Amino acid sequence: MKVLETTVLEATLVRLQCACNGPMRASVCIAFLVMATLSGCNSKPVAKPTPPPPQVTVAEVTQATVPIIYPFSGTVQAVKYIDIIPRVTGYITERKFVEGSIVKKDQLLYIIDPRPFQAALDSAQADLTRSEAQLTLWTGEVKRYTDLAKQGAGSEQQKEEAVAKEAETKANIEQNKANIETAKLNLEYTTLTAPFEGRIQNTKRNIGQLVDAESTVLTSLVQIDPIYVEFKVTRNELFDMQSVTSGQLTGKKVDISNIKFKVLLPNGKDYAHEGTLDYMSSEINPATDTLMMRGIIPNPEDKSNSESLISGQYAPVEVILGETPNSLLVPKAALVESQLGEQIYVVNASNQVDIRDVTLGTLFQEQYVITSGLKLGEKVIVEGTQKVRAGMTVNVTGTDVPKSEPSQPAAEPKQPAAEPKQPAAEPKQSSVAPTEAPAADANS
């Protein structure tokens, strides 16, 4: 089978020959022939423009002393939380606090009607006076019967009865004194005071209501300064923390009482005060595989500062175990998460992209600590990673590190000089398309 090969001009002549065989005039055929010839001679392949290198912003890998920080999810807990319960039964006559306010230690909270207890105290004191008078009587009787017995005038039985009455009266006096102390305590219990400084809750009993001893809850008092922060530590995290506190990483042992921590507020800022760890559980909860740790932190009540911790609130915690010198840092924006793990795009001296697998450390001030995969001074892409791939040449338009800015303009002029060479090579590829498309048309 013979394969016919035609050019654009040949295909045009074939069409012209077919048209001139018809009832068309010769002048029309000649004009059509001239137009076809000129269009064939003047046609040139259109070169596809080469896109410029993608623009990226880079930052240098820096080095600094970085604190060793472990983040946890904590919960704020009150150091003290008690219910105010009366010790005597009676009616409330006064309430001396504002609900929800801060009360000082020994500040008066409630007054229970003291009159019945004052009467009980007066009665006990009267009993003591009576007993002391009887003691005087029986002491004299014992002396008198003793003297009579020596003279042989009194009976021994009368003497023994007087001695017994004297002893009984002395016992009554001791009982009366104990009753007086009880009556004084009950009278003191009619005034309820705050056992420590803290925030008082709402009252559950009002003036005129009867309260029962040892059972009625009047209100609650919460200590807010200082305050606890509790958080859970996994077994793996505990193992890493122990390697730091034992001095394996930093060469310096750290006691739990010297470990500091910070609390993050809901707006992402650091809480104004720093706390200290004061307790670590000795057992791991097998259900959660975690261990409970607790720290104590100042929480002063300052009306001008609304950033105070409240018992029960969620609080992110950052435990500071020490610091590591000469740590490599890159901006947080440089990190790229992929199926292969954490990667960072590095721009070399030729402005070509190299993709590195890195090992991350802690996050410090919006910068990641890199433990492996990078070197000090290398440039990493912080903007434009989605536009590049490995080996691609890029145009560095900005940098976050001022030290590297003077060296960038010297490298950038090399890129425009190379761009004109690429369009000259592309016409060879585009010239195939005009010959192939008409050939298929001619065959049709």
Image: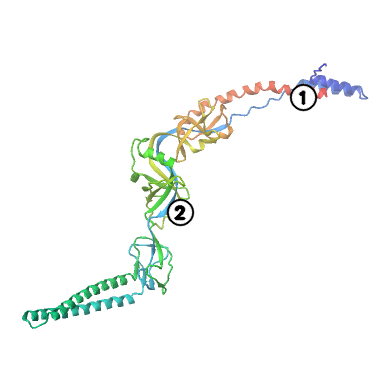
Specify the label residue 313 is tagged with.
2
Q: Do labels 2 and 1 touch, CB within 8 Å?
A: no
Name which residue type carries label 2.
Gln
**Residue at the left extreme, as displayed:** 151
Which of 422 and 90 lies nearest the eye of the viewer?
A: 90
Q: Secondary structure at mark 1?
A: helix
Q: Which mark is residue 437?
A: 1
Asked which secondary structure carries label 2, the reply is: loop
Q: Tag 1: residue type?
A: Ala
**Which one is closest to the eye, mark 2 or mark 1?**
2
In the image, residue 355 above or below residue 146 = above
How many residues crowd around disc 2 within 10 Å: few (fewer than 14), some, or many (20 or more)?
A: few
**Percent position of residue 10, x then y:** 82, 19
Which residue occupies 38% across, 37% down?
243
**Cα distance, mark 2 to mark 1?**
73 Å
**Residue 393: image location, x then y, percent:** 56, 27
Which quadrant holds the C terminus?
top right
In percent of width and height, residue 340 lies at 54, 33
Q: Residue shown at 47%/40% (left/top)?
A: 366
